[in-house]
Image: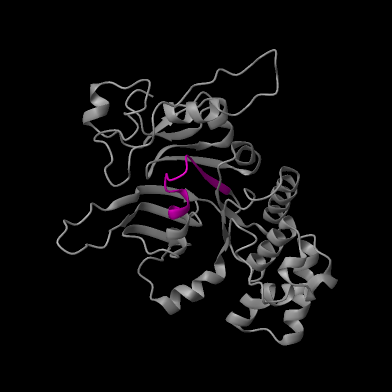
Amino acid sequence: MSEPLLAVKDLRKHYVARRQWLRRPSPPILAVDGVSFELERGQTLSLVGESGCGKTTTAKSVMRLVEPTSGSVKLEGEELTTLDSETMRQRRRNLQIIFQDPYASLNPRWRAGDIVAEPLRSYGGATKAERRERVQWLFERVGLRPETVSRYPHEFSGGQRQRLGIARALALSPKLIVCDEPVSALDVSVQAQVVNLLMDLQEEFGIAYLFVAHDLAVVRHISHRVAVMYLGHIVELATRDGLFADPRHPYTEILLSAVPVPDPRNPARRILLQGDPPSPANPPSGCRFHTRCPLVQDICRREAPELTARQDASGQTRWVACHFR
């Protein structure tokens, strides 16, 4: 098998609170605690889970927008965590991001064309005329009129601003784009347009996406594989069709049961998730989901299950962290 585009192994990000005078140090916050996955070229891996489970921290740690505490992140076989800042900056030609908030991620003082051209200026290698031509092409490709290059961000709608963010991420022809909930701040009708645009761009240019999302309907539409996270861990990793057809981990079952089914003759059985998620500064022993799991037994409180390969009914390999599934 060929080498994956992105390989993440045992990634950890722990936040340590600053010690105050005459007080005992606070325990570290285990935001991401041993995450491993691979992403193939031209495919989409989605990270899903409750708020605070570590999805965005994982994505930003992959890009080193936050420095990981430990672990390995390899892009095309090259270790990123040990690169110095200038070398890492050069590698970001192949590693771009689309932010969640299209209102806050664009400089309000810059014209739209300057925003999209910024990566081209920063990395050099293109004349002013080439940059202008590239920006106009990018505007057309993401569904914006080329004559709007002179407008300011406040003159665009939310969906148009997110298209600007996508054009900026495409400027350097990256191989991997991190999508940090790129449609959650948009109207539902606009969400579908932006998701379809991302899928068209992936098919045309062979881009891989690391897609962070809450909306499972969006995840089902865009993903090739899905990783379910809980309290800094991946508890299940499977193909999209395998996960939605046959969820194995109890937490995955509960998440999918919350998706409304528009069929009154066959209503879905809703499984209620009891209690609040534990604090990442003081996670429970054993399986971190045992405090809310309907299948909990003594072994769950004592031993943390490993993320283990299993075969599903279709013969596909999936990874599940559960003693009984």
**Image point 68% across, 59% down: which residue?**
162
Q: Is residue 39 left or right of residue 221?
A: left
Q: Is residue 249 visible?
A: no
Nearer to us in this view, 105 or 226: 105
- Residue 52 x %, y %: 43, 46
Nearer to us in this view, 113 or 95: 113
Q: Quadrant of residue 241?
A: top right
Q: Is residue 106 left or right of residue 160?
A: left
- Residue 322 x %, y %: 35, 29
- Residue 86 x %, y %: 44, 79
- Residue 164 x %, y %: 70, 64
Question: Does 45 appear in magenta?
Answer: yes
Q: How many marks?
A: 0
Question: Does 126 appear in magenta?
Answer: no
**Image point 56% across, 45% down: which residue?**
213
Q: Is residue 172 above or below residue 9?
A: below
Q: Is residue 53 visible?
A: yes
Q: Residue furthest front?
A: 22
| Quadrant of the snapshot with the C terminus | top left
Q: Quadrant of residue 179?
A: bottom right
Nearer to us in this view, 245 or 211: 211
Q: Is residue 114 left or right of residue 223?
A: right
Nearer to us in this view, 118 or 274: 274
**Image point 46% across, 48% down: which residue?**
55
What span is in magenta?
44-58
Colour mode of the rendering? one colour
Q: Is residue 58 above or below residue 303?
A: below
Q: Is residue 240 above or below residue 16?
A: above
**Image point 49% across, 21% down: which residue?**
271
